[in-house]
Amino acid sequence: MTEPDPRRVGEVARLFTRLGFIGFGGPAAHIAMMREEVVRRRQWVDDQEFLDLVGACNLVPGPNSTELAIHLGLRRAGWRGFVAAAAGFILPAVAIVLTLAWLYERYGTTAAAIDLSYGILPVIVAIVAHAVVGLSRTAVKDVRLGLVAAAACAAWLLGVNELILLAVAAALCAIPLSLPGARQHQASWLFALPAIGGAAAADPSWWRLGWVFLKIGAVLYGSGYVLVSFMEHDLVRELGWLTERQLLDAVAIGQVTPGPVFTTATFVGYQVYGLTGAAVATVAIFLPAFVFVALLSRIVPFIRRSAVAGRALDGVVAASLGLMAGALVRLARTAMHDPLTWALGLAALVVLLWKKPNTAWLVAAGAVAGLAHGALT
């Protein structure tokens, strides 16, 4: 571990604060920006070390690009670099999202805001659909993982708690198919998944809000977009603290702002419980990432050595993809309700598959389309 150096701490703080302000485009774009800065320009690590860190961050739950930023800060300037990278990368996005949450609370129901939502929400559905397609190429490595993903999607739509789904998927995939009876055992669990139920609704409270986002940060694999399925289940269906439209608006805010997609939690927390809720939700969703990065040097060698742990991780990733697909189905029902919204969503998906633009530009195009629709109707 590099000894803490005030000059290096300042260097880490300046770099990741800048990335926190300009880091549009989601985790893949963030990782590309970090490689440009720390490998090519500053030469803090070489390409092999950088890829090792990216792979390590993918092995643990949480926001991968944020974990990578924290890990790079730790490598460069010790524990003070750890804190500087985290604060620099997360806090600018939190401040921007909090401002937008305040504006949304006051002006979110105006005619202009409704027109914006009309055009933006189908684009958000297309962005999530594109992420599902892209992640499926990595997550679904064989027929068994495909079945796990499909079963998780169906079970989640039927009301099964997402933590139960992830745990069952890990247990299923940890069993080698070569063992006697393994296929029959796994199939029986897959069909049993929809029978497991959830919890009852409750009035908003800061501690329960914190638990929801602590849980998300601690178990979320695959993509920041998977958090949509967790929030839809806990905050929309079970607790009733948000509507489907509010959830889509929250995802839209996460898309048009720089920095981690997980700052969606800041927006949601503000809508549910004001400034206290925003602070609690933000701290809760990012806290596990700090713990995982601190423990990563112990976790990664174990996962690499253990065939069972590796198979369980594959199951968790496949189930996460299923959760994401389930959330996509529910969100599409809300966002795409007439020929024009379907056309906007499909056009955005075609552009994403063809050109892979920065998603902020697509959201902006959706906003323009929504305003034009409002002006003509």
Image: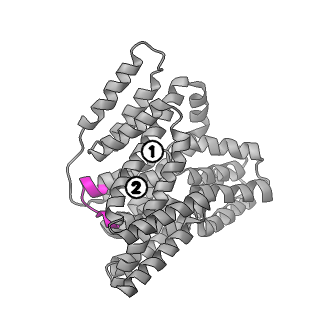
Residue indicated by mark 2: 228
Q: Label 1 amino acid?
A: Leu
Magenta part of the protein: which range? 235-246
Residue 201 visible, this angle = yes
Quarter of the figure with the N terminus: top right
**On screen, residue 228 above or below 139:** below
Q: Is residue 173 above or below residue 127?
A: above
Work out whether residue 351 or residue 144 is closer to the camera in this orientation and state it. Answer: 351
How many tags in the picture?
A: 2
Q: Is residue 232 above or below residue 372?
A: above
At a point 68% along the width and 60% down the height, the residue shown is 33
Q: Element type at marker 2?
A: helix
Q: What residue is disc 1 on?
A: 321
Left or right of 314: which side holds 298?
right
Q: Residues within 10 Å of mark 1 (few under 14, many from 20)?
A: many
Residue displayed at 36% across by 63% down: 247
Residue 245 in the magenta stretch? The answer is yes
* Left-right relation of 203 to 207: left
Which quarter of the image is occupied by the C terminus? bottom left
Percent position (x, y) of residue 327? 37, 53
Q: Which badge, 2 or 1, comes first in the chain's sequence?
A: 2
Residue toward you, 12 or 35: 35
